[in-house]
Image (cartoon, rainbow, N blue to C red):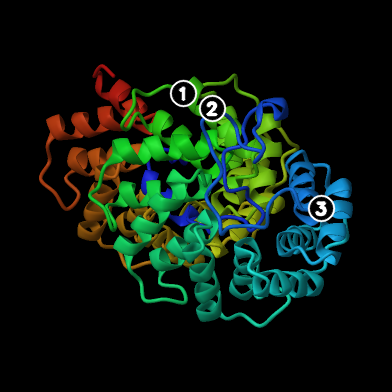
Amino acid sequence: MSTRLGAAALLAFASLIARPSAAQAPCNRVCDASKRDANGCCPGASAAPTRAAPASTTPTASTAVAAQAAEDAHDYARAFTLYTQGCNSGNATACAGLGVLYANGRGVGKDDSRAFALFTQSCDGGSPRGCTGLGTMYETAKGVAKDDVRAASLYLRACDASYAKGCSHLGWMYMNGTGVTKDEVRAATLLTQACNAHVPAACVALGVLYHLGRGVTKDDVESLALMARGCEGGEARGCTFVGNAYSAGETVNRDDARAATFFKQGCEGGDSHGCYQLAAAYQAGRGVQIDDGRAVTLYKQACDGSVPDACTGLGFLYASGKGVATDASRAVALYRQGCDAGSAVGCNDLGLSYLAGTGVAKDEIRAASLFKQACDGGYVDGCSSLGVLYRDGTAVAKDEVRAVALFQKACDGHSARGCSNFGYMYEYGRAIAISRPNAVSFYRQGCKGGDSYGCDQLKRLGESQ
């Protein structure tokens, strides 16, 4: 059976790099509202400095402050009323806040055109938050044609006004070479600036750079600390990364229960990858009690959130009838959805379906193609599956030398079935010198990895597991 968790592959988190949302607050607000200061920040987490605003004693400025407090408290109807009053009185900061509400459909119907007009008005009036919101619209092509260069210039304008969120966005663009020439050193500088000003998304992005050693010296300890900081600030992707670290036992001691807790936090915070990892934990009983029904719900949530491996995981449950009624055709559809979206596991499982004719018409040639796609995509069980076809001459010209190479690649990549198949080649001298000791060694490796075939061969040979 395919391994579903893949938690050790922390590099996959690099694909989670994303710009922070336009509405994110410029300071840490993870505490009870009664403990926040006048800027809405928690103790020890002062607001990021911004361009000097009109004195808070002016009526329009006071209205904007009250509106921001209402927005932070998720009282969007009141925030809408107050921001409207302030904006109509000429307060650029209030217009920016009103634009955020229209852009996100909070307290008012979502309206990108109206948001664009308000962000333009507020940016022209000197609001760095407005410039950041306007940049986001240009970057995401909402309410206006996509223009990354224009977006970068607006983020720069906001950052130059000491608005940390603008620096965070600009750092992301330098990190990915979007709208500017890629410069990871510059990205790290900007993200550090924003992270130190309590922008959680910047801490997470900076953590990715430290994890990969891009623009900074690779430092997994610092990376994990930054991810934890982002998680504490409400950035769900940071929670998922920390969960991955605990699940893999990398940088910290392995702790499946803590991993599941962080995955839950990430999922509940809106990160689909966190939902996927939590689903896998419930399926395997890692850190939580096995609950296939819960796994089904979470896999579906993550699949709907565009996580290809989650579609594959859901397909597996439909194929096995765990947590849901068995439906081979539905399983095939989900495997295909995952494979088409880049899930190498999905390609392998779809190949297995074609090979067996389960839920789809049998097609060994199609299976061979899918196994190759899975293997090339880095899923080593796919290499083992392809090796079996070459060993037996099924749908491809028989080539035992090629089979041995594929089994070895799979085993080296920690595929339990790959190790068992490699042992078979040693036992019977298929394109490799017969060696019972080597056969036993690889059967045992496969068995210890959870492959029943390897265990069966050890029993047949009278060897201990």
Cα separation between marks 1 and 3: 53 Å
The residue type indicated by label 1 comes to Asp
Rendered residue at 35%/54% (across/down): 383
Q: Residues within 10 Å of mark 3 (few under 14, many from 20)?
A: few
Q: Residues within 10 Å of mark 1 (few under 14, many from 20)?
A: many
Is residue 62 in view from this perspective?
A: yes
Helix, strand or loop for disc 2: helix
Along the line of sight, the residue nearer the viewer: 3 or 173: 173
Helix, strand or loop for disc 3: helix
Report x, y in % for residue 8.
Answer: 38, 38
* 197 relative position to 137: left or right: left
Is residue 395 in view from this perspective?
A: no
Count of numbered tags: 3
Whether residues under marks 1 and 3 lie with C-beta atoms below 8 angstroms apart, the answer is: no
In the picture of the structure, the residue carrying the numbered disc 1 is 256
Along the line of sight, the residue nearer the viewer: 36 or 247: 36
In the picture of the structure, the residue carrying the numbered disc 2 is 260
Cα separation between marks 1 and 2: 6 Å
- If you read the primary sequence from the N terminus, does the residue marked by circle 3 or circle 2 appear first? 3
The residue mark sitting in front, 1 or 3, is 3
In the picture of the structure, the residue carrying the numbered disc 3 is 59
Q: Is residue 190 above or below residue 293?
A: below
Rendered residue at 64%/39% (across/down): 269
Rendered residue at 61%/68% (across/down): 131
Q: Is residue 160 above or below residue 210?
A: below
The residue type indicated by label 3 comes to Pro
Q: Is residue 53 above or below residue 183?
A: above
Image mark for residue 153: none
- If you read the primary sequence from the N terminus, does the residue marked by circle 1 or circle 3 appear first? 3
* 378 relative position to 442: left or right: right
The residue type indicated by label 2 comes to Ala
